Image (cartoon, helix red, strand yellow):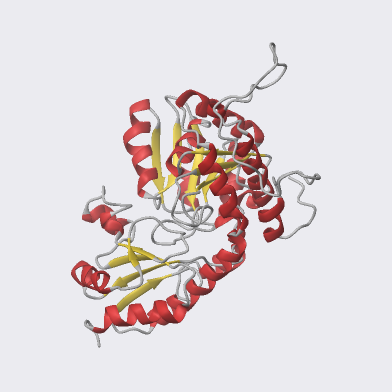
């Protein structure tokens, strides 16, 4: 989509906004209606909320297209709905997906529990060479999450995009952790980008939503699935999401700042075994992160030397940071993935993904970094004072 060369903050505020007219609203109103008047024999699509064609849906889609550089976009009721329908737009029964092994636990559940029942098989791989080796004649989608939840590992999407083009296979990228402020997969050859908009796009931990953006033909197929299965986002939540996105760029600037500050501080603490953050030179894909990302985000993962027992004690002593699943809100949320996003995996499965004992994921909010450090210092002091 043509963005007129405007910056990301300008697009986040103005794209898809209300028309500038005398006595008109500055903010897109909430169209709290399930249906709309139509012609007796409409020539085009019928405006109907369940079809994702409410004016609030359309305003938000225009904003998302401007932010991602997408031909089309669609909002759904959750990130899992976005991932599931994006993949179902690409694959059918008897076909095959090649996916990175490092994915959000909810995505793994879709692939392993639900798609397997539909005779859709998934092969998990670790690197670009693995993707190339795993492609079959019936492969219809490549899937990667950048950065991966919760280890923040990275794969280069550019050779994956080339591989996808060579084989006529769509590349689907989950960029929830990055947001279009830090990384836009479509600019690097992806065909679809998905987000759990519950996270950074909404930004306030008060709604559940998902986003699919990219090639118009694939988004059109996602809408067909939306119409069939019905995971539509209601107008009020859509309005809240559109409002949240207006401040995305300024929020991400603080998330990026706090992420780097806290990650750097944690590296020197004696209780810490390792810190996982793409902005640190110690990160295995640090060079790639610097090439791809304009910021490294607010999620920092840490492994404590005392294992899960220490991790639980430390979390119980936190006073400012909140113990809660999810991420991307203005408040700092802390969780242990073994109990949340990857609870369905056994110990061996978690370790294979790099989720070691003592693993804590921190989604750093927009609070003052000194206060967050003081909270961590207090929580860790009893272990290594």
**Residue 279 in the image: x percent, y percent?**
51, 72
The residue that appears at 48% across and 34% down in the rendered structure is 85
Which residue appears farthest toward the left when viewing the image? 309
Image quarter (top left, top right, bottom left or bottom right) of the N terminus: top right
Locate residue 230 relative to residue 53 in the image: left or right.
Answer: left
Locate residue 354 relative to residue 225 in the image: left or right.
Answer: left
The residue that appears at 34% across and 78% down in the rendered structure is 376
Corner quadrant of residue 52: top right
Give the number of marks. Answer: 0
Q: Nearer the viewer, residue 220 or 161?
A: 220
**Residue 245 in the image: x percent, y percent?**
59, 54
Which residue appears farthest toward the front when viewing the image? 23
**Residue 44 in the image: x percent, y percent?**
70, 20
Q: Nearer the viewer, residue 56 or 157?
A: 56
Image quarter (top left, top right, bottom left or bottom right) of the C terminus: bottom left
Relative to residue 257, is residue 212 depicted above or below? above
**Residue 307 in the image: x percent, y percent?**
22, 70
Which residue appears farthest toward the top when viewing the image? 41
């Amino acid at each position: 989509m043509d963005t007129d060369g405007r910056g990301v903050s300008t697009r986040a505020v103005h794209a898809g906004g209300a028309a500038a007219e005398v006595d008109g609203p500055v903010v897109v109103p909430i169209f709290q209606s399930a249906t709309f008047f139509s012609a007796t024999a409409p020539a085009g699509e019928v405006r109907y909320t369940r079809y994702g064609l409410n004016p609030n849906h359309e305003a938000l889609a225009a904003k998302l297209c401007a932010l991602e550089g997408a031909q089309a976009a669609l909002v759904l009721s959750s990130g899992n709905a976005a991932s599931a329908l994006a993949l179902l737009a690409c694959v059918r029964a008897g076909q095959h997906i090649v996916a990175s092994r490092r994915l959000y636990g909810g995505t793994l559940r879709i692939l392993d529990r639900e798609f397997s029942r539909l005779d859709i098989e998934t092969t998990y791989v670790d690197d670009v060479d693995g993707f190339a080796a795993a492609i079959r004649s019936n492969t219809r989608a490549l899937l990667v999450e950048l950065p991966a939840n919760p280890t923040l590992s990275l794969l280069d999407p550019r050779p994956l995009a080339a591989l996808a083009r060579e084989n006529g296979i769509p590349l689907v990228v989950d960029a929830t952790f990055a947001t279009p402020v830090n990384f836009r997969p479509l600019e690097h050859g992806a065909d679809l980008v998905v987000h759990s908009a519950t996270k950074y796009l909404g930004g306030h931990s008060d709604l559940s939503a998902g986003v699919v953006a990219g090639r118009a033909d694939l988004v059109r197929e996602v809408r067909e699935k939306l119409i069939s299965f019905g995971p539509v986002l209601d107008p009020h939540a859509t309005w809240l999401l559109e409002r949240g996105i207006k401040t995305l760029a300024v929020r991400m600037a603080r998330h990026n700042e706090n992420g780097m500050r806290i990650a750097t501080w944690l590296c020197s603490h004696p209780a810490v075994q390792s810190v996982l953050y793409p902005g640190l030179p110690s990160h295995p894909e640090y060079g790639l992160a610097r090439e791809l990302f304009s910021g490294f985000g607010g999620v920092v993962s840490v492994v404590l030397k005392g294992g899960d027992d220490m991790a639980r004690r430390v979390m119980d002593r936190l006073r400012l940071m909140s113990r809660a699943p999810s991420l991307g809100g203005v408040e700092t949320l802390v969780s242990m993935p073994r109990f949340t996003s990857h609870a369905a995996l056994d110990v061996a499965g978690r370790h294979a993904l790099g989720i070691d004992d003592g693993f804590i994921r921190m989604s750093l909010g927009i609070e003052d970094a000194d206060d967050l450090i003081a909270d961590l210092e207090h929580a860790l002091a009893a272990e290594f004072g």
